[in-house]
Image (cartoon, rainbow, N blue to C red):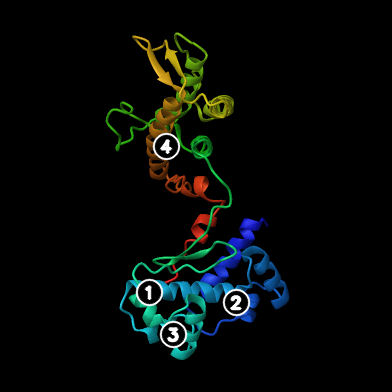
Amino acid sequence: MTATDRLAEILELVEQSLDEPGTDGDALARRAHLSRFHFDRLAAAALGEPPGRFRRRVLLERAAHQLSTGSVAVIDIAFDAGYEAPEAFTRAFVRAYGCSPSQFRRLPNAAAGLPAPSGIHFHPPGALRLPATEGRTTMDVLLRMLDHHLWLTGEIVDRLAGVEPEVLDRPIELSVEGIDADPTLRSVVTRLVSQLEMWLAVFDHATEIEYPSDNSPAGLRARLDRVGPAFRTLMEQIFAEGRAAETFIDATCEPPQTFSYAGVLAHVLTFSAVRRTLAIGALETAGVDDLGAGDPMTFVGGHGSDAGRISRKMN
């Protein structure tokens, strides 16, 4: 288990306990199937503070947000934060914020965040905000989006083998005007692959393009295996060398036109998203529904399922 997975697991346990008054470190350790000592050690390593202190801080941050943005009675906020007596809540709040809850409520633009070794804070309306674990440039994000496109296209291609030929060639009833004429599942997926073949040929100064004729599921898989890595490697090299804005002539156009590498990548990501969505919808109509919506959110912005796990509501 990676450090990110461990952090997500601990956060999930803490999140689930936030609205359970009386939950302590022993209870959290039992839920994690660990001894209290082992759980505290792992949690402290991941969070930079003991889990009990982390939980109390997040609850106080939530209370501070409630005080500054609403009219809920202090006694109710105190109970939601896990304090049976308002006096105990007031003492804890004063230690953390330097003023009473009532005084905090009257402060303009009061900041609810408290010092946190992990940088993890309550994020209204009801989630935890995690700091970035790594710096990402625009190039990193674009290449990650390209990775998602190539991966998902491969997943779509692999599922064609389980679809009857007549279904592959059945017209897609819902289409997008100006993208592809009379699309079918086979033609849309073929275009996802041939688009990459086309641009690689253009980059190589082609004046005309001959596409492979094998549009079978196996043929498309072989074509994607050739062109996908080559396109990705070239894009990474161009971005790393600072040549994204560099232009070239596309001699396959009539008349020839000038494009930039950055423009090509934007073009590929934009139009492929439409075709992938059409393909996923056609697959679902054919009974293949395990790809969901093809959303790149967690692929690009999170690790595995972490992005979903750490945004659980805390209301």
Q: Which residue is mark 1?
A: 66
Near mark 1 (Cα within 10 A), the count class, few <14, some 14-19 or many ≥20, is some
**Circle on res. 79:** 3
**Helix, strand or loop at mark 2:** helix
- Label 2 to label 3: alpha-carbon separation: 17 Å
Say which label, 1 or 4, has the lower sequence index: 1
Q: Please say if 203 is above or below 32.
A: above
Say which label, 4 or 2, has the lower sequence index: 2
Near mark 3 (Cα within 10 A), the count class, few <14, some 14-19 or many ≥20, is some
- Label 3 to label 4: alpha-carbon separation: 49 Å
Q: Which residue is mark 2?
A: 52
Near mark 4 (Cα within 10 A), the count class, few <14, some 14-19 or many ≥20, is many
- Label 4 to label 2: alpha-carbon separation: 46 Å
From the viewer's side, name the closer residue of 277 and 28.
Answer: 28
**Circle on res. 276:** 4
Say which label, 2 or 1, has the lower sequence index: 2
Q: Does residue 92 appear anywhere in the picture?
A: yes
